[in-house]
Amino acid sequence: MYKQIQLATHSEINQALSFNTYIFLLLASSVVMTYQAMENNFEAVAFFVFCALIRSLYWLQSDFRLNQLFTYLIYAVSCFLISTKFVSSGILNGLFSLLICLQALTIIKLRHFRELKTLVWVHLFLTAASLLFYLQIQHAVLLLISAILALACLLAHFLAGEHFKQVLNQMLKLVLIALPIGIVLFLVMPKLPPLWKMPKVQSQTRGLQDELSLGDLAALSQSSNLAFRASFKDKAPEINQLYWRSFTLQHFDGTTWRRNRYMESWQAVAEKKRQGLKWNNLQDTDFFEYQIITEASFQHWLFGLDLATSHQIGVLSLPDFGLYAAEPLTKRFQYSAKSYVIKNLPEYDTVNIDKLNLQLPSHKNPKTAEWVLNLQQNSNSDDDFINKVLTHFNQQAFYYSLKPQQLTYPLIDDFMFNTRTGFCEHYASAFTYIMRLAGIPARVVVGYLGGEYNPAGDYYSVYQFDAHAWSEIWQAGKGWQRVDPTLYVAPQRIGVNLQHAVGNDEFLAEGDFSLIKYDQFVAVKTARMLLANLDYQWTRWVLNYDTKTQKNFLKQLFGDTNNMWQSIILIALFFILFAMISFFSWWLFRAKNSRSEIIKLQDLALNKLNTHYGLAKETQQTPTQLLAIMSSEDTELISRWQRISLLIEEIRFSELTEPAIKIKLKQLKVLIKNL
Amino acid sequence: MASFIQYLSQWRQARLESFINKRIPASDSHTLDRKNIFILPNWSGLCYLAVCAAIYLLATNYESNLGLLLCYWLLGIFLVILYLSYFNLAGIKLVSSQTFDVHVEQNLTLQIQLISDKDRYSFCWQDGYKTELKKVNASHQFVNLGWQAKQRGLFRFPRVRLYSTAPFGLFNVWTWLDFNRKTYVYPKPLTCPEYQFGTGRSDSEMDDSSNDENIGDSEFYGLKPYQLGEPLSRVAWKRASYNNEWQVKQFEQSISDDVWFSLAKVAGSEIEEKLSKLTWLLINAQQQNMTYGLELGHKVLQPQTGAAHLKSCLLALAKY
């Protein structure tokens, strides 16, 4: 007898799956599979959908068997899908592809609880995998719902025959009790560093690219995606001073601005050796301290105000005053930086200045060259020349537009003397080119300008449409100076924002739907800001909750006590949590329907009968049968007990509605009280 | 070596048995609580934990806080499921209500009343038939546990294992209950019409012929031709010896009056076979409303009739 401790129960194996179970499974899978399909696993997901469809068709037919040949075909297809994925997109996507195919093969053969469990386990892992890519709060909530639905499948299997609302109700209670445990564990459990090197998460780069052709930024400006968010510690600069530098471009081939070899060698050192430049002697100037949370760009570029420094590990300074991440930003990345306000930035490598910043493309722009020569002859100094160029931009009919015309070669000539319509990169390119023609070292700087202040969260959001390009010129004795030619064409762009500068019709005209376009409605703007703040706090407290934040948090919670006390408090906390969980599980899942109440009332009545009148019920007797043993003289008791037993039987055995039962229960309580 | 292992497993089983007997003593009724419920994660539960571990590794290596949160939350759910699995059994009252006597190869039934204050799911019993209740309602409900009766005699209902994996299939929650019930298993009836009018007593003081004459203290009233299947003891041998015609002695009131069934007189190669035949004879006699007595070695049940008498006769057979 004792040897029969079999682990699998016969019921689980043989019982057919209920319809609820299947619906929950499909709902849960559809969420995760959609995310997986968006993340480069489209073929495998299509295969899964195909298998699920076949299974759904056969659902109507209880004795369905797969054709043997068809099974082999399916296996072959999945093998093909997995192997091509491994070859084409690397090990990680290959692994996900494998798991999706596994799901597909399991769902097509789904008959029993065992297969269902396999599906649920793999589903949970795929949910975690999707969370690697989709970090925003709305995606996280959706994916968690899908995990809940997957677990609800298991519950629905045991509660077969119950209404799906009851299953969901139970599941919701369970999830809510478990949530505090999850949160507390998340807050206090020590975080381990990565245990081993994993294949990198790969995706297309987003945001600024490290080469700039005329028209690139105008295209990027159609996107209302977030680039990064910044919160200043004590004070923030004026909004028109928020020139967020990302990187400089120094090599121009007549069409495209690129990084040069020199800067690329610095990048290589930063990535491999994690070494950057140290800026010295900056202590005595004014500074701003701020924190930046970047979105996942899958690139190395970071953002900072001039002159940005950071002590964060993995954040390095490059000689072109940019900040550079040693690892590509595969997810939201948070770093703190300190910017020193220096008007004239010193050059680190003065020897190479001319070589790097006076380079001209072999492709000539004769009209511009002639114009520069004329202008130079009429100027008495470099400064005068620069002013004259900027005045030219300001006073001639130059237009600022998100939809500049297509330029013809030579591009700068066409822009300067023909179209005269362009976005910031047109002006920055033309100005830098002109400077170089005049022998003044110059380069293009790419980054973002401005940002939207969110008062609730006290931070600035910088969007892709805030992308900006400006110029930087070097003069002996003065160092690098920022010159923004756009300022002389469209002052509103710098003073207010892009939307103001180009007008509402042109702003985000070709991009995806975005709430930002409807900012003229106050309610829309308020809602958008609220959501943005929610997402910001989510990023700060959940996505970027690292070891350092954890330490600070625990310090805040328990004070700066020594380790032993802290661990004792933590252990006590765990016990309290444990006790609370036990209590809540019992309380939420206790019996509380009217049918259970009637049993309690019946016991109460029987107890009273026993103590007051000495009449005990035998196991098999019903309350009504007790009337037989009551002495016939006590008519009062008999009539009372008759009413009580009648009510009990009515409530227990007749099909009454819930409100009717409640009324009867009240009557019964009064009767028992008076017994 | 093999015998040593066998010895070890026997010893372990004996230890387990005595532990269980001490922990959950036999009783008519049991209320399930933490004293008599055992709970352990099953394979599915371990798989669940393995998935949690895999998610933890993935999240740690990719430094994904959301993955970690998911992992910890799943662990929290695991803990709550532990409670739910326990509450699925805890609090229910089981009362053994009825047993029925049966014959060998029939089903022994133990009726148990389940008194529950809430809905419970998937009650699996490891009785002889793996009885299963998919749902136990919040009320009083009966379940019949069954075993195959294999042996004649006293049957003590064994400890029955009640287990459930509801509501998620991650934990095995079980208990071993002994309802302290016993019943008797009567021999299996074996048709034997040749003795249906009694075998006569195996009284050593009377010889066969006189016994024949005096059977049931009734009066001899005539003869009729012998038919196959009639007891040989009633053949009138004296007449047969001179006219070669077998005739059977007929007695007045012999059938309705006292019939005796004796173990010693029933033909059969084995004792079980004889007892089976007697069982059939007794039941048959009761059906025909005879007044019958039973003689089992030294034990003698005086002739009577009625269901109670039949029961005591069968009981005597079961105990023999």
Image (tube, helix red, strand yellow):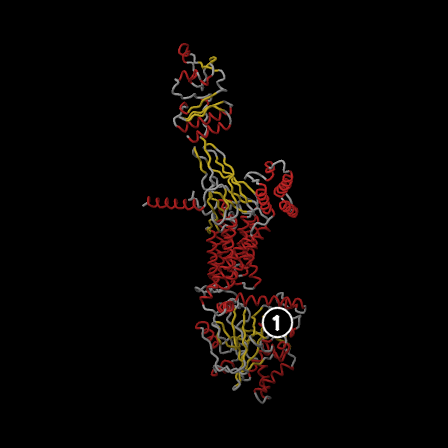
Secondary structure beneath dot 1 equals loop
Depth order, front residue of A20/B160: B160
Q: Which one is in front, A351 or A332?
A: A332
Taking B217 as reference, is A422 above or below it? below
Say whether residue B197 is visible: yes
Q: Position of residue A230 (x, y in %)?
A: 56, 72
Label 1 Cα crowd, 10 Å radius (few <14 / some 14-19 / many 20+): few
Mark count: 1
Q: Quadrant of the C terminus of chain B?
A: top left
Q: Residue at x 65, y 79 (%)?
A: A397
Q: Position of residue A161 (x, y in %)?
A: 57, 46
Q: Is residue B195 above or below residue B5?
A: above
Q: Quarter of the image holding residue B266? A: top left
Outermost residue on the left side: it is B1
From the image, tell me which residue sits under label 1. A455
Badge 1 sits on which subunit?
A
Q: Is residue B201 above or below residue A501?
A: above
Farthest right residue? A521
Q: Quadrant of residue A527?
A: bottom right
Res A251 seen here:
no
Horizontal side of residue A352 vs A421, given as left or right: left
Q: Position of residue A416 (x, y in %)?
A: 61, 79
Q: Disc 1 residue type?
A: Pro
Single out the residue that lies furthest toward the bottom: A380
Establish if A11 lies above or below A374. Answer: above
Instruction: Where is residue A141? Give x, y as percent.
Output: 57, 60
